[in-house]
Image: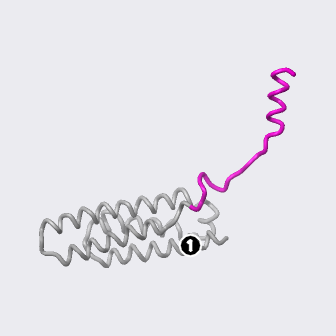
């Protein structure tokens, strides 16, 4: 048997495989963004309840760090989980992600200690979550 025949035999018996996404879809979950957004809200509440300047500074630092994590988790969902068919089925999805990430940014929770802004962020994440779970059922 020649080397060419051996290689040909090996590849002729290969099985082709395909995958839905780069990693198993089970790793994605909007709960990660929600948990961080809840931490943002809690830091804002702690900030408002305190009169200690050092404590307030730490609360702001935590709030801003967690706001950045919210954006990160939303971006991962937006860019890695959701695909063209999802955006076709849910045309509002791009706007929801844009609004949510802005609510977690400098014009949102990073730029204020207003708990109402954190509530708006949590509401947007909930809308994204509902669509996410609907796509998981499909």
Q: Residue 26 vs residue 75: left or right?
A: right
**Highlighted magenta segment, given as a residue range:** 1-26
- Who is closer to the viewer here, 51 or 9? 9
Q: Position of residue 19 (x, y in %)?
A: 68, 53
Q: Quadrant of the C terminus?
A: bottom right
Q: Residues within 10 Å of mark 1 (few under 14, many from 20)?
A: some
Q: Is 127 above or below relative to 22? A: below
Indicate yes or no whether the magenta region holds residue 130: no
Instruction: Give the residue displayed 54% in from the left and 75% down from the top.
Output: 130
Q: Quadrant of the N terminus?
A: top right
Q: Is 7 above or below relative to 133? A: above
Q: Residue 28 vs residue 68: left or right?
A: right
Q: Position of residue 128 (x, y in %)?
A: 50, 71
Instruction: Give the residue displayed 29% in from the left and 62% down from the top.
Output: 64
Q: Which residue is mark 1?
A: 131
Q: Position of residue 122 (x, y in %)?
A: 40, 75
Q: Position of residue 132 (x, y in %)?
A: 56, 69
Indicate yes or no whether the magenta region holds residue 2: yes
Instruction: Give the residue displayed 42% in from the left and 70% down from the top.
Output: 34
The furthest residue to the front: 1
- Who is closer to the viewer here, 35 or 134? 35
Instruction: Give the residue displayed 21% in from the left and 73% down from the top.
Output: 47
The furthest residue to the top: 2
């Amino acid at each position: 048997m020649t080397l060419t025949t051996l290689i040909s035999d090996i590849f002729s018996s290969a099985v082709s495989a395909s995958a839905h996404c780069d990693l198993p879809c089970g790793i994605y979950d909007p709960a990660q963004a929600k948990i961080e957004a809840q931490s943002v809200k809690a830091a804002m509440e702690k900030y408002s309840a305190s009169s200690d300047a050092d404590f307030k500074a730490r609360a702001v630092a935590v709030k801003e760090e967690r706001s950045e994590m919210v954006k990160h988790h939303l971006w991962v969902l937006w860019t890695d989980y959701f695909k063209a068919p999802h955006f076709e089925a849910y045309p509002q999805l791009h706007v929801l992600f844009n609004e949510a990430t802005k609510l977690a940014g400098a014009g949102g929770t990073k730029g204020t200690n207003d708990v109402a802004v954190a509530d708006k962020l949590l509401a947007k994440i909930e809308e994204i979550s509902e669509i996410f779970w609907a796509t998981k059922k499909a």
